[in-house]
Image: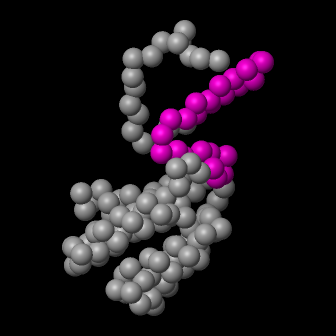
Amino acid sequence: MVVSLAATAAAALVQAMVTDGWEGVRHQVARLFGRGQPDAAIERRLDMTRGQLMAAPDNPGTLRAELATQWATRFADLLADRPDAEAELAALVKEIRPAVTANDHSVAAAGDVTARAQGGSVAANVIHGDVHLGPTRPDQVSS
């Protein structure tokens, strides 16, 4: 559970770095690490991470994954040192992780995504992560 929460928190954090709500998220994460007071070292690391992400080329997918891995380790260390922080981190993740986001010609969703081509257009999806297929048939698609 701790490793999964740390990974989820890290992914949500890196994703939040490119949103309008970043400053609020930054403050909350720094306070989490600082036990209620902003942790200056974490603030510097957050700023460095965001700087790397913002300076990335047009397709920063690999960089995002690397940065998320770094933050997953930091969150896992935090939870190992302070098991009482688990509920607070879970609440933070729930607050900052949007159900659906769109960025850099992509969509991330905590649920189903459908791409439909109509009238001679083209629809395409690229999948990064797990895929779960169910028993569907093309003739079952509703209009």
The residue positioned farthest toward the right in the image shown: 119
Residue at 61% from the left image edge and 65% from the top image edge: 18
Please tell me whether residue 112 belongs to the stretch shown in magenta: yes
Please tell me whether residue 15 belongs to the stretch shown in magenta: no
In the rendered image, residue 6, in percent from the top left (x then y), is placed at 33, 63
Depth order, front residue of 19/141 = 141
Residue at 55% from the left image edge and 9% from the top image edge: 139
Depth order, front residue of 68/63 = 68
Answer above or below: position of 143 versus 30: above
Residue at 22% from the left image edge and 73% from the top image edge: 83
Q: Is residue 33 visible?
A: yes
In the rendered image, residue 109, in percent from the top left (x then y), is placed at 52, 44
Answer above or below: position of 64 versus 118: below
Position of the C terminus by quadrant: top right
Chief secondary structure of the magenta portion: loop
Residue at 75% from the left image edge and 23% from the top image edge: 121
Position of the N terminus by quadrant: bottom left
Q: Quadrant of residue 55?
A: bottom right
In the rendered image, residue 87, in percent from the top left (x then y), is placed at 30, 68
Look at the image and name its color scheme.
one colour
Answer above or below: position of 44 versus 65: below
Depth order, front residue of 120/79 = 79
Q: Is residue 64 visible?
A: no
The stretch in magenta equals: 102-125
Depth order, front residue of 53/102 = 102
The residue positioned farthest toward the top in the image shown: 139
Q: How many numbered marks, from 0 up?
A: 0
In the rendered image, residue 114, in percent from the top left (x then y), is placed at 58, 30
Q: Is residue 96 left or right of residue 57?
A: left
Q: Is residue 110 left or right of residue 104?
A: left
